[in-house]
C-alpha cells in the first residue's frame, strides 16, 4: 500500500483505559437498572460492543433511561476515575513522530465524547501531532459501520485505501476494513485470534511491537 494517512482509535488504542470505562459503566448500571448479570458479564459485554456510540449503547444497558443525562453521568465518572492514571500506550509517541517524519497525515477517529478526547489529547500533549480529530458527531453511525473512518480519511484528504487504521476492538477493525483501510490492532482489550478474525492484518501488544512488525 501507499501509506499517506494513519487513523487512530483512542480508547483502548492510544490509551489503555478500558477498565476505567468498564468501571464507570458498571456503576451506572447498578445505579439505574436492574441487570441480573454479574459485573464480569457486563464488562465482557462492554468489550464486545467497544466502538459503539453512547446513544446506541445506553439503551442496551439502561432501557428507558434519559440517554443524554446518563451519558453525562457516566463520562464524568470515567474521567474522574481515569485522570490520575492517564498515560499513552508504550511506543505511541515515537510511532506518531516517525509517521509524521515520513509525511504521513494523522487523524484520531473515536466515539469518545469531546471532554474525554480533550483529557487524552491535551493531557498527554498529543493534539499538535494530529491533522484531524473526528468524533461521534461527525459520523451518523457508530462502529462497525465505516462512517467515522471515512470521515477521518476525508478530513485528511487521503483515500481510505492509502490509510492504515489502528484499533483494539473487533467492531473498530470491522469499521476500518469496511472503509477500505488496512488495520493494525493492539491486544489491550481483545485476543489476537479475535482481532485477526475481525480483519486485522497486524497484531501486537503495544506500539513498540507494532512498529517492529510494520517496519
Image (cartoon, helix red, strand yellow):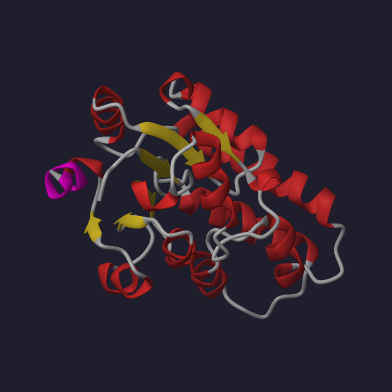
Query: Which residue is nearer to you in this view: 156 or 117?
Result: 156
Query: Which residue is nearer to you in this view: 22 or 208?
Result: 208
Q: Is residue 214 above or below residue 156?
A: below
Q: Residue at x 55, y 34 (%)?
A: 133
Q: Based on the picture, tell me whether residue 161 belongs to the magenta stretch.
A: no
Q: Residue furthest bottom?
A: 36
Is residue 164 visible in the rendered image? The answer is no
Query: Which residue is nearer to you in this view: 5 or 85?
Result: 5
Locate residue 23: give its quadrant: bottom right
Principal secondary structure, stretch drawn in magenta? helix
Q: Position of residue 181 (x, y in %)?
A: 39, 56
Q: Position of residue 51 (x, y in %)?
A: 55, 58
Q: Residue at x 81, y 71 (%)?
A: 63
Locate residue 196: give its quadrant: bottom left
Q: Based on the picture, tell me whether residue 212 belongs to the magenta stretch.
A: yes
Is residue 211 visible in the rendered image? The answer is yes
Q: Residue at x 17, y 47 (%)?
A: 214
Q: Does residue 189 appear to the left or right of 44 in the view shown?
A: left
Give the residues in magenta.
209-214
Q: Position of residue 101 (x, y in %)?
A: 25, 22
Amino acid at each position: 500500500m501507499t501509506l499517506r494517512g494513519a487513523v487512530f482509535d483512542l480508547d483502548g488504542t492510544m490509551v489503555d483505559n478500558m477498565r476505567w470505562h468498564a468501571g464507570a459503566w458498571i456503576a451506572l448500571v447498578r445505579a439505574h437498572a436492574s441487570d441480573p448479570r454479574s459485573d464480569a458479564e457486563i464488562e465482557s459485554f462492554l468489550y464486545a460492543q467497544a466502538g459503539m456510540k453512547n446513544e446506541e449503547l445506553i439503551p442496551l444497558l439502561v432501557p428507558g433511561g434519559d440517554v443524554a443525562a446518563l451519558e453525562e453521568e457516566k463520562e464524568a465518572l470515567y474521567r474522574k476515575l481515569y485522570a490520575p492514571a492517564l498515560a499513552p500506550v508504550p511506543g505511541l509517541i515515537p510511532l506518531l513522530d516517525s509517521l509524521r517524519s515520513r509525511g504521513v497525515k494523522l487523524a484520531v477517529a473515536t466515539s469518545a465524547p469531546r471532554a474525554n478526547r480533550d483529557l487524552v489529547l491535551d493531557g498527554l500533549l498529543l493534539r499538535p501531532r494530529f491533522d484531524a480529530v473526528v468524533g461521534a458527531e461527525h459520523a451518523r453511525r457508530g462502529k462497525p459501520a465505516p462512517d467515522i473512518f471515512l470521515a477521518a480519511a476525508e478530513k485528511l484528504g487521503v483515500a481510505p485505501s492509502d490509510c492504515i487504521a489502528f484499533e483494539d476492538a473487533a467492531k473498530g477493525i470491522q469499521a476500518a476494513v469496511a472503509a477500505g483501510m488496512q488495520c493494525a490492532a493492539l491486544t489491550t482489550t481483545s485476543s489476537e485470534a479475535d482481532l485477526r478474525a475481525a480483519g486485522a492484518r497486524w497484531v501486537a501488544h503495544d506500539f513498540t511491537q507494532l512498529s517492529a512488525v510494520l517496519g
